[in-house]
Amino acid sequence: MSTAEVHNSESSKSFIHVPFRPKRTLVGNTKHVIKGIALGPIYMLLAAFSPMPGLRFRANCFALGIRALFRLRRRLSLSAIFHLLFMPMDSTRYFEFDVVWKWLAPHPMRRYLDVSSPRLMPVSLLDSRPDVVADLINPDSQDLTESRRWVDFIDARDRCQLHGCLISDAPFAPDTFDVITSISVLEHIPEDSIAIKRIWNLLRPGGVLVLTVPCMARASEHYIDQNKWGILEKNSTGYIFWQRLYDESHLQQRIYSVTGQPDRVSIFGEKRAGSMSSNAARKRSDLDYPYWREPYMIATEFQYFDRLEDLPGEGVIALYFVKKQ
């Protein structure tokens, strides 16, 4: 991956080139799976001796994977089961899933909306809360099809509706939901303030909104030459808007101006500037990237921070809002 940077008064801009990566052969895929089975538990054990987030959620994923092994008729693929058992999360997902799970565990809810988060979080919430009625939004039709398999697997089809649309087209009335989650999504929406206004409008008074977004001490925007979702158009440079990394000023202007100040905040980031982007570059180019190493990487190369200004590089901020009555 090559990245060029342009700086202006508001934020830096990075342009990311995604190299061609051939599909893994059957033999190569088999070797990769065997390595994951053999090395995954070792790296998990090493990580368990370090203060890191997500280990309890990871254990929940393993239990879900064991259930899936005995219910193959429910049509979860062997690949999905393998990832549940040995590498269900990567990178800062360990932090994001951990903090969202902890924050929502004591919170009562009946109507729940998830806005395009990685499916593992809303599926796990639905699986653990049989009284919840959920709506999941995702404009990616392929991803939505896979999500339906997961909803069927946990026997939640009668209380979970899936919608292939953007949040701007969500077919709901104002003040509908008790809880709304959106994990690492808002940063991919160019008009993020408009999206957060729509999300906030759907939350009932007294309801809870939990967001996570990438962050830095100084804001940055990333553009990419791969049209992953087919939603946005390339600009004059041939690149597509990929994501925004928020600093304190951007959070105030783009999110808090709609929601007010968050009731809870948690920040998690890399200890050494550049390690997160170089790891992401390797994932894009290396067919045999060792995902099973991720827990140990998070345990040793990341930490919690008190303020965005303290971040040496990239991080993720989790935000918990209660809509005033």
Image (spheres, rainbow, N blue to C red):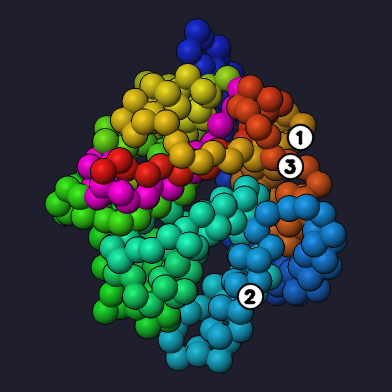
Q: Residue 199 magenta-drawn?
A: yes
Magenta segment's dominant SS is strand
| Separation (CA) of disc 2 from disc 3 | 23 Å
Identified at 58% across, 41% down, the residue is 266
Q: Residue 17 magenta-drawn?
A: no
| Separation (CA) of disc 2 from disc 1 | 28 Å
Type of residue at label 2?
Phe
| 258, above or below 153, in the image | above
Q: Is residue 90 visible in this depiction of the protein?
A: no
Label 2 close to label 1 by CB (< 8 Å): no
Mark 3 — residue?
Answer: 302
The residue segment tinted magenta is 198-217
Left or right: where does residue 91 sit relative to residue 213? right
- Decide which of 223, 276 is in the foreground and name it: 276
Mark 1 — residue?
Answer: 271
Label 3 close to label 1 by CB (< 8 Å): yes
Q: Quadrant of the C terminus?
A: top left
- Residue 50, disc: none
- Residue 62, disc: 2
Type of residue at label 1?
Lys
Mark before the other along the chain sequence, 2 or 1:
2
